[in-house]
Amino acid sequence: MPFEILIAEDNEYTAKQYKLALEKRNHKVVVTKDGVECVDHYLNEAKYDEFFRKSKAPPFDLVLLDHDMPRKTGADAAREILEARPNQRLIFLSAYGNGIMQKLADLRDETVQIVQKPFSLSFLIKKIEGASIRNKIINAQDANVLTVTQDSAAIR
């Protein structure tokens, strides 16, 4: 099932890698270059949905956030997004996982997760898509699920 995904990533190369990998899986992807642009885009989509579709559901199935970005951190962007739509699923993609969770201690629940960098794109896809992709990866590896660091074909 394809997802609508919003990405906030200030590294252009990394953002392109995420976008290409996710679009190959038929997901609809919007990339923003920092926290301010991400929140602006998110709130515009939320207002559109509320006004025209009469829906207060999250406008995206998932928001992927880098943490260290210019103008607004991922944690600050997450707070604004969750204020608008408390049930929005967020995944931080960062090398600073423990620090992020400390900053967001009051928001920890099933909607906020962290994927610690470095990771492979196949690991990210598994995290996003859940059990359906996990079963395919297990079958493709002869019942051995590779960890992120063991995946020699990982694009980082």
Image (cartoon, grey):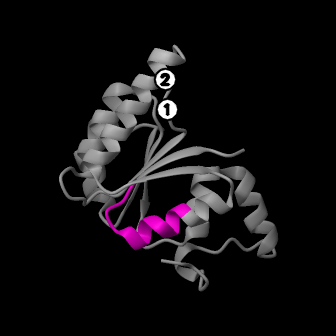
Q: Main secondary structure of the magenta part?
A: helix
Q: Position of residue 24 (x, y in %)?
A: 67, 62
Label located before the other in sequence (2 or 1): 2
Q: In the rendered view, does 147 fall on the left or right side of 86?
A: right
> Is residue 16 found inside the magenta-colored segment of the image?
yes
Residue that extends furthest to the left in the rendered view of this protein: 71
* Image: 25 above or below 86: below
SS of the residue at dot 1? loop
Any part of residue 21 in sight: yes
Instruction: Name which residue type carries label 1.
Output: Pro
Mark toward the viewer: 2 or 1: 2
Badge number at residue 86? none
Give the camera-side residue of 17 and 104: 17
Label 2 close to label 1 by CB (< 8 Å): yes
Q: Is residue 121 left or right of residue 129?
A: left
On the image, numbered disc 1 is attached to which residue? 59
x then y, percent, for residue 151: 60, 80
Residue located beneath label 2 in the image: 49
In this rendering, is residue 70 above or below 104?
A: below
Label 1 neighbourhood size at 10 Å, few (<14), some (14-19), many (20+)? many
Question: Could you tell me residue 11's position as x and y percent?
Answer: 34, 68
**Amino acid type, callout 2:** Asp
Q: Residue at x 49, y 71 (%)?
A: 119
The range drawn in magenta is: 8-19
Q: Is residue 70 left or right of residue 34?
A: left
Q: How far, Cα to Cα, is label 2 from label 1?
A: 7 Å
- Residue 73 magenta-highlighted: no
Above or below residue 27? Residue 137 is: below
Residue shown at the point (23%, 43%) measured from the top left = 76
Q: Nearer the viewer, residue 123 or 11?
A: 11
Relative to residue 13, is residue 38 depicted above or below? above
Rendered-image quadrant of the N terminus: top right
